[in-house]
Image: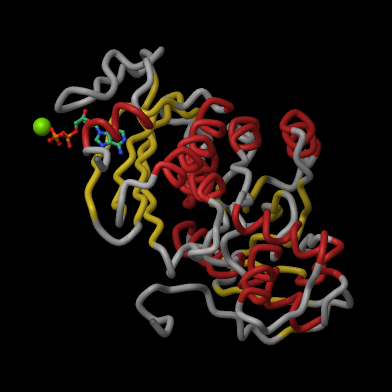
Amino acid sequence: MPIGEFELIERYFTRPVRRAALGIGDDCALLVPAPGMQLAVSSDMLLEGRHFLSTVEPERLGHKALAVNLSDLAACGARPLAFSLALALPQAEAGFLEGFAAGLFALADRHGCELVGGDTTRGPLAVCISVFGEVPAGAALLRSGARAGDDLYVSGTLGDARLALEVFRGRVALEGTAFERVRRAMEQPEPRLALGLALRGVASSAIDVSDGLLGDLRHILQRSGVGATVEVDAVPRSAVLAAQAPGLQRLCTLAGGDDYELLFSAPGSPATAVAAAAAEAGVAVTRIGRIEQAAGLRLVDADGRAVADGFGSFDHFRASP
Ligand code: ADP
Ligand code: MG
């Protein structure tokens, strides 16, 4: 007998809630934001073939589906509270569901984010999560706060996820531990929640890098009504990526996508506040440029020479299907 819809929800996804007033089982879940807090809400959808490959381990898919959502909370400086999960599955396969739930709940538990509801349907594999977080009223990090003179920073390293994708596409050869490392970056990104919290009151603007550094930076520039210069060689990259051809390094770091690092601006002095936030969060942060009054995005190399900006950002409706 194949497992039914409600048995599936009960067996794999229903857990007692601690903070929510009501979890799975009724028509709505009930959340209780603390007094003085605003609710931060975001959704991200993952479709097979578009956002992940069929070769991905279920456990890593469960992790990534929640990670990309938590990354949006991190970019706003919000603390995770709860999430909902809409799932389309071609069939109710126990091995897949066990692995998926294990990866999902391992990350959820680490960040105190509880599953409070969702929807389950039969169909081509798709995962849509909505996250709910809380942030003190008026304290959320926004894309709109960058000011001329601010420094630009990025967390961690960029480009590994794109490098892994190029390996899967057969355009780059990489083996052994080097491949496993970049594959992990693509399949199991770590949302920078502690950094987002530490940057409240420090960063003037922030965004998480999901579509590529330069494309996401343009969102900050547009929203803030400013321009910027980025030192392309200063963008941090892993040792694995640093061993690749220079052109590939630039493509992956500047327009790679799927990085889920935080890109943010902060007033140039005191830069110690940024260093303290990074230390508190235990995440490396690198200065990669500066916000300027003059509109537009300028790229320079280590010697200050202009670099042509031929790096597009990912756009679902412009990319070839
Ligand atoms: P409704 O018909 O009212 O939309 P459903 O019958 O679809 O509710 O779902 C029953 C309960 O199970 C609801 O509380 C819903 O939030 C929850 N639920 C359904 N699918 C999931 C899922 N994949 N993960 C978590 N909760 C789910
Ligand atoms: Mg209902």
Residue 264 shows in this picture:
no
Ligand 2 sits in which quadrant? top left
Relative horizontal placement of residue 291, taking residue 52 as reference (left or right): right
Colour mapping used in the image: secondary structure
> Looking at the image, which residue sits at the far front?
1
Residue at image point 62% right, 59% down:
186
The one nearer the camera, 63 or 304, is 63
Residue 15 located left or right of residue 77: left
Q: Please state the horizontal and vertical placement of residue 321, each as a whole percent of the image.
A: 38, 81
Task: Compare residues 218 and 283 and report the one nearer the observer.
Answer: 283
Q: Report x, y in % for residue 27.
A: 14, 27
Instruction: Tell me the quarter of the image containing the N terminus.
Output: top left
Residue in view at x 65 percent, y 76 percent: 166
x and y percentages locating residue 42 in the rendered image: 37, 44
Residue at 78% from the left image edge and 52% from the top image edge: 286
Nearest the viewer among 302 and 210 is 210
Q: Taking 17 as reference, is 268 above or below it?
A: below
